[in-house]
């Protein structure tokens, strides 16, 4: 493990010193690819969401412990306020992740990924009405409206399906609304997680946060398995166990790469590149033979456009702030 960590450190230093502008692009593009692979593995695993979260938590915890030990990163000894934030962040992250894997069961990978991009919309709403750090404007209302229309198209209500000639309603389409609602609740929780991460980033090492999150995931997924029969684990096959391990490894690497990308690159560029995740999502849906509705494509375009417009708008505001 020490050899692997050393080689990764050497590669990142080499990449950042010889290709300073391109390195964050490599990080973010690799990160979103790993995120899409994570969704694909979870979609094809055939286990309930609670077991996926549990298995992922164990793998992330093991890797995190080895890495923090090798890097001599302190995981303890914080004051009570930091422990409270770590616990709250971990709890919110656990339920957000559980809802994501649950919602992914009902919708396509591409639809799940475009809905997860609406986290920035929730973050803006929190900034306006709770943190009071932003103000509501006509342009912002238009962004919200386009995003809402995009979500409506992703839900694919029967009258819209008939309008575009999609008359057949199978079980998957009937569950489309449920899946979208679950994923939107997940994005709301993830937006709260982002706010807490910003507060914690100046207090603890970035490796500490996923370690506490993985431990909380293991504890609470175990508790849910004892309370709800639908969340009880089953013994996985060799292939399923391999996929579970891959989900944990991919999730951990994806978090590190995305954090590194936002640390080293331009925030606006990284956020815009993040929208290319939709390409991977649709590619994986096509490869697994999923039905892709024209409503889903139009909704994805509307949501991605509103988010990109919001990113550019925030960048202009920051450029006008005197440094």
Image (spheres, rainbow, N blue to C red):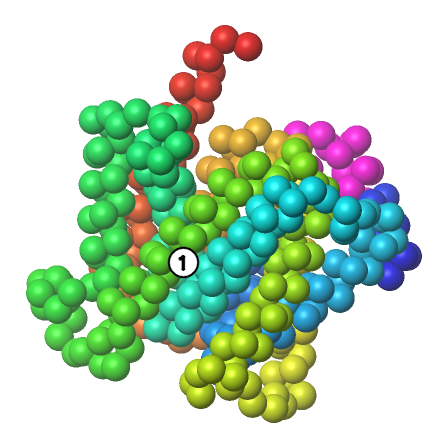
Q: Which quadrant would the C terminus be assigned to in this image?
A: top right
The rendered magenta stretch, by its main secondary structure, is classed as: helix
Q: Please report the residue visible at 55 percent of the width from the left and 85 percent of the height from the top.
A: 233
Residue 312 picture quarter: top left
Residue 144: percent from the left, percent from the top?
A: 25, 39
Report whether 117 appears left or right of 263: left
Instruction: Tell me the magenta residue range.
Output: 11-23
Q: Which quadrant would the N terminus be assigned to in this image?
A: bottom right
Residue in front for this viewpoint, 153 or 230: 230
Q: Is residue 183 magenta?
A: no
Residue 279: percent from the left, percent from the top?
A: 45, 54
Kindly identify which residue carries mark 1: 186
Residue 248: percent from the left, percent from the top?
A: 65, 67
Q: Please report the residue visible at 16 percent of the width from the left and 65 percent of the height from the top.
A: 157
Q: Is residue 292 above or below residue 199?
A: below
Q: Please report the residue visible at 31 percent of the width from the left and 34 percent of the height from the top.
A: 129
User: What number of labels is visible?
Assistant: 1
Residue in front for this viewpoint, 82 or 322: 82
Q: Could you tell me which secondary element the residue under label 1 belongs to?
A: helix
């Amino acid at each position: 493990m020490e050899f692997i960590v050393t080689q990764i450190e050497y590669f990142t230093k080499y990449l950042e010193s010889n290709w300073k502008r391109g390195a964050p692009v490599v990080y973010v593009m690799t990160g979103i690819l790993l995120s899409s692979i994570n969704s694909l593995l979870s979609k094809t695993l055939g286990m309930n969401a609670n077991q996926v979260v549990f298995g992922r938590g164990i793998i992330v915890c093991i890797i995190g412990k080895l890495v923090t030990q090798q890097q001599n990163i302190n995981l303890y000894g914080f004051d009570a306020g930091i422990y409270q934030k770590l616990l709250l962040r971990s709890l919110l992250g656990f339920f957000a992740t559980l809802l994501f894997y649950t919602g992914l069961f009902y919708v396509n990978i591409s639809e799940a990924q475009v809905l997860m991009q609406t986290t920035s919309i929730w973050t803006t709403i929190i900034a306006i009405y709770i943190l009071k750090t932003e103000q509501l404007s006509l342009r912002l209302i238009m962004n919200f409206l386009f995003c809402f229309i995009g979500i409506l198209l992703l839900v694919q209500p029967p009258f819209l399906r008939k309008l575009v000639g999609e008359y057949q309603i199978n079980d998957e389409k009937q569950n489309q609304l449920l899946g979208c609602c679950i994923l939107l609740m997940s994005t709301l929780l993830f937006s709260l997680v982002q706010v807490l991460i910003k507060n914690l980033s100046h207090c603890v090492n970035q490796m500490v946060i996923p370690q506490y999150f993985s431990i909380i995931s293991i504890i609470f997924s175990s508790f849910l398995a004892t309370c709800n029969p639908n969340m009880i684990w089953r013994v996985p096959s060799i292939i399923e166990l391999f996929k579970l391990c891959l989900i944990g490894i991919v999730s951990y690497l994806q978090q590190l790469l995305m954090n590194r990308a936002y640390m080293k690159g331009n925030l606006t560029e990284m956020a815009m590149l993040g929208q290319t995740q939709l390409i991977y999502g649709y590619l994986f849906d096509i490869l697994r033979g999923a039905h892709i509705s024209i409503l889903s494509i139009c909704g994805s375009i509307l949501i991605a456009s509103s988010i990109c417009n919001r990113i550019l708008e925030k960048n202009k505001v920051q450029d006008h702030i005197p440094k």
